[in-house]
Amino acid sequence: MELQEKVKLMTANVWADVFGNPVPGRDTALARMVIRHHPDVVFFQEMHPHWWASQLSPLLHCAGYRRPEPDLHGNPLNYTPLYYDVTRLEALACGFWKYTGLNDYDSKSVTWALLRVRESGKLFGAMATHLYHEQNDRGNTARLRNVRELLACAEALRRAADGDGQIPVFCGGDYNCDLLSEPYAYLEAQGMVCASRLAACKVNDICTWHAYPVYDRMRNVYHSQPSDMDSVYSIDHICVQGSAAVDSYTVVCDREAFTVSDHCPVEILARI
């Protein structure tokens, strides 16, 4: 199968405003960064209520992005939305699953969409997710449960594509575990592999998470510093399952990445 259609994908944890870190200013900075990079699909995590009331969605809407709106099955809010460039892509189906078991704020979930490239008709799946956070045995057990449910959602996505097992599926999010963890090993054993391991070009080798940005009253801005760890300890991933080639993998280190969140976005360029 010849892989010719290029797609750019980005994942970004927005840093929920539950740590005395208000959203105004961070929302417009994040929108600027996304619009500058202009991914075809962007996956978000920690979209708490004030983020939904912010300028992020309107600014992305003005830039040509839309989001699928699946049935949330009674969940009051989608904390893991994805947005796609409507000028290039159309959504054929979508779904949502809130992970069972441990789930703070009911925020650990997966949103999926079956997308079609308008010009070529190529299909691919996109999934935005956030796994449970505790860094202990209880959290690890919860994440193992999460990834099993995540893989079931990938199967549901393929069924929406008439069961086409060959369509590529990209799953971006905050997995709250690194590439040395048991949950990631389980995903990889099922063929869902981190793009950093598949990329022909790994643009940089930096860990995605870093210290919480600190508010500077004199400059009226939050700021932090890049991590001094390498990417094997990253917890933000875009994983790939199915027929796709990853041309490049980048941890986005724009200035905004250290003012918006304690996570740098990840961006990949892939061929489907």
Image (tube, rainbow, N blue to C red):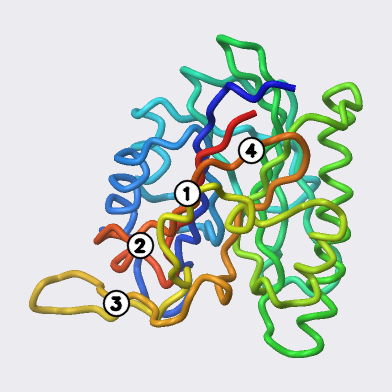
Could you tell which of marks 4 and 3 lies nearer the N-terminus? 3
The image quadrant where one finds the C terminus is top right
Please state the total of marks drawn on the protein image.
4
| Nearer mark to the viewer, of 2 and 4 | 4
Could you tell which of marks 1 and 2 lies nearer the N-terminus? 2
Residue 245: mark: 4
User: Label 4 amino acid?
Assistant: Ala
Instruction: Give the Cα separation between the discs numbered 4 and 3.
Output: 33 Å
User: Label 3 amino acid?
Assistant: Ser
Residue 50: horizontal and vertical position, in percent? 44, 58
Instruction: Give the Cα separation between the discs numbered 3 and 1.
Output: 20 Å
Residue 224: mark: 3
Mark 2, other Cα within 10 Å: few <14 / some 14–19 / many ≥20: many
Could you tell which of marks 2 and 4 lies nearer the N-terminus? 2
| Nearer mark to the viewer, of 4 and 1 | 4
Could you tell which of marks 3 and 1 lies nearer the N-terminus? 3
Instruction: Give the Cα separation between the discs numbered 2 and 4.
Output: 36 Å
**Which residue position is annotated with label 2?**
23
Judge whether residue 112 can be spotted in this image: yes
